[in-house]
Image (cartoon, rainbow, N blue to C red):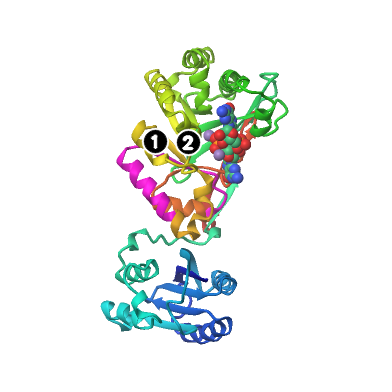
């Protein structure tokens, strides 16, 4: 079994194109020793490379390549396995696209193939060559600056930053974490995340409950969230709360209870968004659809949380249209380096844009993840990069500041 990795990357601006020759000579030697074949395309700015060979060698070489300072924005496009080599000769071969006719270069690459009959156009790897040469995906190549282009400094002078010192309940507490639009420097909504009374994580709170007890407790906890948010000075800002979909289905009169508690805490339904986790929704979709109707009819917004985390997420967009989806951290982790994640998220964005559904990305930890998503058209974010959840409080937000402006 052979491993194939294809990536593309961007030559750093300050690196002269003349280093290319040395690079190829060194790579040729290294690849040959490791039994790896490499085909490198360069168009004057971007690299595109296929590496194939024994799994460990290909991965080791790819890791070294990723760490090479001479290029950046390395995006892995394909990582796959094949029964035989496409390119028999080990080492490294460079095709400088500036010196080739576009059609000619593809033919030349195919001519390098070992088993020529296998190098047909429906081979995924070959398709990637074609796409790169024809530049047909170029609008999806986002070039982002290095991580230190931005600095993230918590704005502790913000008047809304505060912590409550009274206990609001004996059974639970909440931490609050904002969703923000970093470029507009706006808070979009504040999410209430359940905690045990002593501030232990959500999971711990759930562990303390048995069987169906969980649904009533989940619903009832929302009155605590509303009370705390109100005391924190929510004002007219929007508040997001999480609910298990089955809480609405199993607890009689759940929506009325929510409406009553919203009003009792001086809030209005229109400022509340209820988030439901995708995979939980799917398991009881029909029951749940009715509850969503009730919420919407009352003015409460609905968001699909952990979108892309389970199966059938896209189908949910057809079944009922949420006001917002939150793309799961699983899809967002290191998105700047992953072709498949980029493709999935771009498709989600396209779909939601067509349906006028707002998108936020959750669990942003790295500046590069944020920058890539901004380039792709996402503008609302939640994550440790900007603010960690604050127990019984509103945390300071680390707005991105251009490094050179500081
Ligand atoms: P969620 O709604 O997706 O909430 C975001 C979770 O991601 C929170 O975990 C938060 O602390 C965490 N998080 C935020 N930013 C980052 C980041 O940059 N990196 C990483 N790794 N994590 C980040 P938490 O508070 O433990 O909540 C876990 C889940 O529990 C929530 O996920 C939500 O689905 C559920 N949950 C929370 N509160 C409630 C509630 O009142 N009722 C119900 N039914 N579920 C709740
Ligand atoms: Mn949530
Ligand atoms: Mn989550």
- Magenta stretch holds residue 152: no
198 shown above or below 379: above
Q: Left or right: where does residue 166 sit relative to residue 134?
A: right
**Earlier residue among tags 2 and 1:** 2
Q: Position of residue 4 (x, y in %)?
A: 48, 70
Q: Left or right: where does residue 138 sit relative to residue 86?
A: left
Residue 387 shows in this picture: no
Q: Left or right: where does residue 376 sit relative to residue 73?
A: left
Provide the secondary structure element on which disc 2 rests: helix
Q: Left or right: where does residue 207 sit relative to residue 108?
A: right
Q: Position of residue 140 (x, y in %)?
A: 36, 58
Q: Position of residue 399 (x, y in %)?
A: 53, 45
Give me the residue at 41% from left, 60% from top.
Answer: 142
**CA separation, marks 2 and 1?**
8 Å
Callout 2–callout 1 Cβ contact below 8 Å: yes
- Magenta stretch holds residue 365: yes
| Residue 278: mark | 2
103 shown above or below 402: below
The residue that mark 1 highlights is: 316
Provide the residue span drawn in magenta: 342-367
């Amino acid at each position: 079994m052979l491993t194939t990795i294809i990536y593309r990357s961007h030559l750093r601006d300050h690196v002269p194109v003349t280093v290319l020759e040395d690079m190829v000579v060194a790579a040729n030697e290294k690849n040959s020793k490791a039994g790896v074949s490499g085909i490198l395309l360069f168009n004057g700015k971007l690299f595109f490379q296929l590496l194939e060979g024994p799994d460990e060698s290909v991965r080791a070489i790819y890791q070294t390549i990723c760490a090479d300072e001479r290029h950046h924005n390395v995006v892995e496009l394909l990582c796959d396995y094949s029964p035989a080599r496409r390119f028999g000769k080990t080492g490294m071969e460079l095709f400088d696209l500036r010196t080739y006719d576009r059609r000619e270069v593809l033919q030349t690459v195919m001519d390098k193939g070992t088993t020529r009959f296998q190098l047909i156009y429906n081979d995924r790897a070959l398709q990637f060559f074609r796409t790169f040469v024809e530049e047909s995906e170029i609008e999806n190549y986002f070039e982002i600056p290095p991580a230190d282009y931005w600095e993230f400094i918590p704005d502790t002078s913000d008047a809304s930053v505060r912590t409550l010192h009274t206990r609001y309940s004996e059974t639970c507490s909440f931490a609050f974490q904002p969703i923000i639009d970093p470029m507009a420097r706006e808070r979009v909504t504040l999410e209430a995340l359940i905690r045990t009374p002593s501030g232990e994580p959500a999971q711990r709170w759930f562990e303390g409950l048995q069987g169906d007890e969980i649904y009533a407790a989940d619903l009832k906890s929302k009155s605590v969230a509303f009370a705390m948010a109100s005391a924190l000075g929510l004002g007219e800002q929007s508040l997001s709360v999480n609910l298990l979909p089955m809480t609405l289905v199993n607890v009689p009169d759940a929506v009325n209870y929510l409406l009553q508690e919203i009003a009792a805490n001086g809030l209005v339904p229109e400022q509340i968004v209820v988030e439901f986790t995708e995979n939980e929704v799917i398991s009881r979709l029909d029951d749940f659809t009715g509850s969503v109707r009730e919420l919407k009819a009352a003015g409460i917004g609905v968001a699909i949380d952990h979108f892309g985390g389970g199966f059938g997420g896209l189908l949910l967009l057809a079944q009922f249209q949420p006001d917002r989806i939150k793309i799961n951290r699983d899809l967002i982790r290191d998105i700047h380096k992953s072709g498949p994640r980029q493709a999935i998220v771009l498709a989600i964005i396209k779909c939601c844009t067509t349906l006028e559904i707002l998108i936020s990305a959750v669990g942003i930890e790295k500046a590069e993840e944020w920058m890539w998503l901004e380039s792709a058209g996402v503008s609302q974010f939640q994550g440790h990069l900007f603010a960690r959840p604050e127990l019984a409080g509103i945390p300071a937000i680390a707005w991105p500041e251009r490094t050179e402006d500081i």
